[in-house]
Image (cartoon, rainbow, N blue to C red):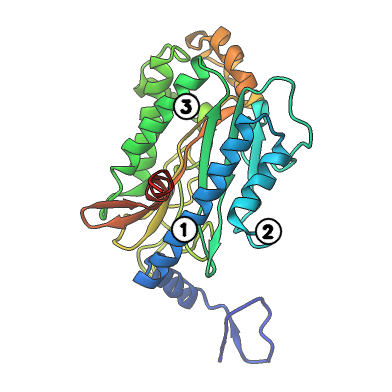
Amino acid sequence: MVWLGESPAPRAGWVANPPRLLARLELERATKSEYELSCLREASRIGARGHQAAASAFREGGSEFDIHQAFLGATSQNETELPYGSIVALNEHCATLHYQLRDRTAPQKLNSLLIDAGACASGYASDITRTWAANPGHFAALVQGMDQLQLRLCGQVRAGIDWRELHMEAHRLIASLLREADVLRMSPEEAVASGVSAVFLPHGLGHLLGLQVHDVGGFRDLPEGEPIPRPPGHPALRLTRRLLPGMVVTVEPGIYFIDSLLRQLRAGAHAAQVNWALVDELRPCGGIRIEDNVVVRADGGENLTRAAFAALTST
């Protein structure tokens, strides 16, 4: 007998969580049925309403706690019903990748909002991130550039693409954006090869999405196969497979100004190729992440998140 669940098995002689069976189940879960996709679309619609309300609360000068409450109210879901703990970060807090504190008092000067928050529908999750600049300037231009860059990456999602290659393409595009913004004064190719791009993007491009926010089935093509390795120097990547029709992925490139990583860069061999005056100007804004949920199709991708936001603006 086989037991699937928390170990140990409840009876002697039962085999708990056999790896090959778990791998087969995870592979089946990686592609979604039409019913599952309908649930994911609804989760995106609910999440988009929450993000719209959060952006309004930010523009009205709300604190992190106020913005979080606006998100909850618009989704009609409480914290235990959300698929994960929402990240609601203002100013330099945007540089903390999984920030959770939610200050009750708004900062005297609002620079930026990064909100990473999703909703649930029949157990299925959305996972959406948006970044907003309070004022025009260099940071607002970077946000706009990141939005265009992220849409370009979403446009490359299709069956047969090796996710690792798309992740590396994200690094090349972000290095190009940083060079165009005069943050970096080195070629995009050199920034990626040297690891400088990873200072500004220290996480993976995205992951599978479904019943779990970081859904299963992202590292093997066959149940008996070995895990597909991550690219060297990119240990945080949560998906290494070629994409199949029916998978749902998040696409979430980012640029962050993280003090600990910047200190290492400033002390390293490539410090002279960084515009530190501009970095210091951008540090109070923390960082940028734009994240959409995309269904993999044979001839492209269905962007659930952009469709959900577009539906809000058309009503």
Q: Tell me which amino acid carries mark 1.
A: Leu
Q: Tell me which amino acid carries mark 3.
A: Val
Q: Earlier in the sequence, mark 2 or mark 3?
A: 2
The relative height of residue 291 versus residue 270 in the rendered view (above or below) is below
Q: Quadrant of residue 144?
A: top left
Q: Quadrant of residue 248?
A: bottom left
Q: Name the residue under label 1.
A: 209
Counting from the top left corner in percent of width and height, residue 40 is at 44, 62
Q: Residues within 10 Å of mark 3 (few under 14, many from 20)?
A: many
Q: Nearer the viewer, residue 213 or 119?
A: 119
Q: Residue furthest front?
A: 315
- Which residue is pictured at 67% across the width and 31% down the height? 93
* Alpha carbon separation for disc pair 2 and 3: 29 Å
Counting from the top left corner in percent of width and height, residue 167 is at 39, 40
Counting from the top left corner in percent of width and height, residue 209 is at 46, 58
Q: Mark 2 vs mark 1: give the one in front.
A: 2
Asked which secondary structure carries label 3, the reply is helix
Q: Do the residues labelled 2 and 3 touch (CB within 8 Å)?
A: no
* Alpha carbon separation for disc pair 3 and 1: 25 Å
Q: Mark 3 points at which residue?
A: 143
Q: Nearer the viewer, residue 238 or 111?
A: 111
Q: Tell me which amino acid carries mark 2.
A: Asn
Q: Mark 2 points at which residue?
A: 78
Asked whether the viewer can see residue 217, the reply is no
Q: Which of marks 2 and 1 is nearer the N terminus?
A: 2
Q: Residue furthest right?
A: 104
Asked whether the viewer can see residue 53, the reply is yes
Q: Which of marks 3 and 1 is nearer the N terminus?
A: 3
- Which residue is pictured at 36% across the width and 55% down the height? 241
Asked which secondary structure carries label 2, the reply is loop
* Alpha carbon separation for disc pair 2 and 1: 21 Å
